[in-house]
Image: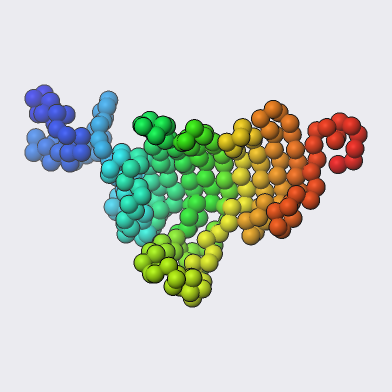
Amino acid sequence: MASWFTALIDKPAALALTALTPSLVTAGYAVDAVQDARLATLTVERINVVEPDGTLRMVISGKGTFPGAFEQGREIPRADRNTLAGMLFLDDEANEIGGLIYSGSEGKDGIQSGLSLTFDRYKQDQVVQLSSSEGEGVARGGLMILDRPSASFATVYEQMRLIDEARALPREKRGAFVEANPKLQNFGQQRAYLGTDPSGQSTLELRDPSGRVRLRLSVGAKGEPVIELLDEEGRVRRSVTYEETSAGQTP
């Protein structure tokens, strides 16, 4: 038994889980023993968490084995995820419903690092995102709230397919394609943001249904607080500063 287990843990990490079950059965152990196994350390490249009926509910993965997107259990390739590690969450129907992704390294171009935790609307993209990033000498982090259309309008996967079709067209024909496909015209809008920007300012922005900033509360790098009211064109129509209120001016 000891020699078998030593051989097992010497196998490449990606093969460890695959090797575990048949080896235990061959050794005469019941399947329940595998289900109840307790290990101090488990080293793998990817874990798929499934329900008893096989429905995929979560993927925990390192870089290179991270999955694409999922719709009703069908995986949709996402080449942009090949360099990420993290976790992918799926709902009761095996649709992607959020996840945690991250990466970070320092090379000849400096530090490139980021982390994003997202929560999606049903068959849609994220409605809540907590993120941080660093690159080109700039670091920032924040919380974003977004609107998304219902799945009955267009799922995020339909939109991805249409975007790919549009990109395959000559540039001069893309505008007409978008006009002819209403499902490309409503991805939702950012409605609120709380975080920091490269200038060292902390900001709370509230936006209207069209995604335009209408109220901004900020504290600058030197600690100066400001309240701004903006019109539909993005012009500041009214601002309130600490100096004004301290001087007894009416806000």
| Residue 73 makes an appearance in the image | no
Instruction: State which quadrant residue 16 falls in.
Output: top left
On the image, the x and y values in percent for residue 38 come to 26, 30
Q: With 31 as the anchor, is 145 left or right in this view? A: right
5 relative to 133, above or below: above
Residue, x 26% and y 38% (percent of image)?
A: 45
Point out the image quarter for the N terminus.
top left
Quadrant in which the C terminus is drawn: top right
Q: Where is residue 148 in the image (x, y as percent from the top left)?
A: 54, 58
Q: Residue at x 11, y 37 (%)?
A: 23
In this view, the residue in front, 209 or 236, is 236
- Please tell me in which quadrant of the rendered image residue 189 appears: bottom right
Residue 150 screen position, x and y as percent: 53, 63
Q: Which residue is drawn at 61% across and 32% down?
A: 200
The reply, left or right, for residue 94 in relation to residue 201 is left
Q: How many labels does the image show?
A: 0
The front one of 70 and 224 is 224
Residue 183: x %, y % from top left: 49, 69
Quick one: 23 or 99, which is closer to the camera? 99
Question: Would residue 26 be found to the left or right of residue 187 on screen?
Answer: left
Residue furthest out toward the top: 2
Given residues 72 and 30, the one toward you in this image is: 72
Question: In this orientation, does residue 123 appear?
Answer: yes
Q: Is residue 179 left or right of residue 106?
A: right
Q: Residue at x 49, y 32 (%)?
A: 137
